Amino acid sequence: MSGESTLTPTRILVVGAGGREHALAWKLGAEPGVEEVIVAPGSDAMAALPRVRRLPDVDPLDPGSVLAAARATVAELVVVGPEAPLAAGVADALAADGIPVFGPTAAAARIESSKAFCHQVAAAAGVPMARSGAFDDAGPAIDFARSLEAAGRGVVVKADGLAAGKGVTVASDIDEAVAAIRVAVTAGPVVIEERLEGREASLIALCDGREAVALPISRDHKRLRDGDAGPNTGGMGAYSPLPDLPDASADGLLDRFHRPILAELARRGSPFRGALYAGLMLTADGPVLLECNARFGDPETQAILPRLAGPLGPWLLAAARGRLAAAGVPSPDAARLPVLPEATVAVVLAAAGYPEASRHDDTIIGLDRIAVYGALVFHSGTVRSATGGYRTAGGRVLAVVGRGDDLAAARDVADRAAEWIVFDGAQRRRDIAADALADGPTPGSSVEAGP
Ligand code: AMP
Ligand code: GLY
């Protein structure tokens, strides 16, 4: 990075309360030049980080409340973590007030908040996605599903709007698809897609409206149980890098997916500033876009931020100000953020009953052992109890992140550390990154290593 790109935000407001925001606060709070990271509403675990202050009373869904917090804390940069505040117009309110915000306007965030809109933008941009149709009523949706079946294709049923990764049914037969359609239309429009086969990859890029710079590629594990069984969740674990899609692949993928989408959104008058997340399916015919998110992934963020070799804050600020070009992006050595050569594996521990109805208030033990293993832990759904420990607060309770020279070593650290964390009914996958290990050794990172 050069010139004004080296501007470091000294006071950063992070909006959100989950594990992704915990990882962001951990990373940003440790960077040179950062005086304070303010988290709103944040969590008890985030407040325990050095240089992090919590504003628990901020309503992340109320643009006025977030704007007031940004003004009161004299934040030089606001980073919006979750999708719901973006869809509620939090970034619009901050931008209108001249406060640099990393996170798209509500109009640009429709790329995530409406799957039908994502398909329209991708089609106009020439970005490959699964064959699909959008419907308000069950009848035509079922007809379309049957036509896919007749063509020998599987069917995927998706709620059009935001569903925290849980509004998707990958149907195993047409009866399941029809049943899912009947349920889904009662809540709003549905998108029906052809079912694609392949392994998935998450490629998140920092975008300034025109340009994009890639974070390391990672792989989420969406299903609840080992062997990709059980219902879809928000994500049960992630790892990085991918043996089958090395970090360097991002250069070509940005050209194929992110840049055309950025150009099309800009053409429509909704330039996208923030984290554009492409969920890719690596099919036999090449990568296909499954979905776009308008934010960092969770738990991908917990896996990829520990791999960054340098600071993140200056890049987020440059993107928020529409000035990635001034930071030298794109250039042969700045289409990707520099990474450390090490690998990471993030293992999620979810509450009993997740994803349908998760239980709260179970005592968590063993957190104090994590450091012994050199693992990191990021909290998504915990509260501090009166006695000083933590209790569960539902959902994906926390993620344990192992780091190592390769994926096998990182996975070993994550698994051993996760063994020590115990709460009633904890759900955890034991096969995060197992697919990669079956592929053989992880290729070394092809991007320059940090100091
Ligand atoms: P989405 O929220 O659209 O990414 O969907 C959540 C998950 O459902 C994805 O990560 C995939 O595992 C699965 N999925 C979504 N769309 C498809 C599709 N067209 N074919 C196969 N699996 C899909
Ligand atoms: N882990 C998937 C997502 O963040 O949407």
Image: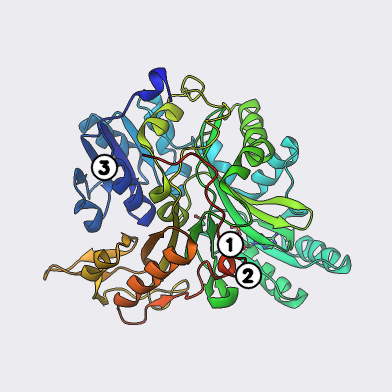
The residue carrying pointer 3 sits among few (fewer than 14), some (14 to 19) or many (20 or more) residues within 10 Å by Cα, namely many
Which quadrant is home to the C terminus? top left
Task: Choose between 53 and 440: the one closer to the eye.
Answer: 440
Query: Which secondary structure, mark 2?
Result: helix
Q: Which mark is residue 363?
A: none
Task: Name the residue at the right extreme.
Answer: 151
Residue at which label 2 appears: 183
Give 286 or 112, whichever is nearer the viewer.
286
Q: Is residue 443 above or below residue 432?
A: above
Q: Earlier in the sequence, mark 3 or mark 2?
A: 3
Q: Secondary structure at mark 1?
A: loop
Alpha-carbon distance for marks 3 and 2?
44 Å
| Picture layout, residue 291 above or below residue 315 | below
- Mark 3 and mark 2 in contact? Answer it, CB < 8 Å: no
| Amino acid on which disc 2 is placed | Val
Is residue 235 visible to the viewer in this orientation of the structure?
A: no
* Residue at which label 3 appears: 29
On the image, the x and y values in percent for residue 203 come to 56, 47
Question: Looking at the image, which residue is at 56% across and 46% down?
Answer: 247
Kindly identify the amino acid type of the residue bearing the numbered disc 3. Answer: Gly
Q: CA distance from mark 1 to mark 3?
A: 40 Å
Q: Is there CB contact under 8 Å for labels 1 and 2?
A: yes
Mark carried by residue 187: 1
Mark with earlier residue (1, 3) = 3
Tell me which residue sits at (27%, 31%) in the image: 75
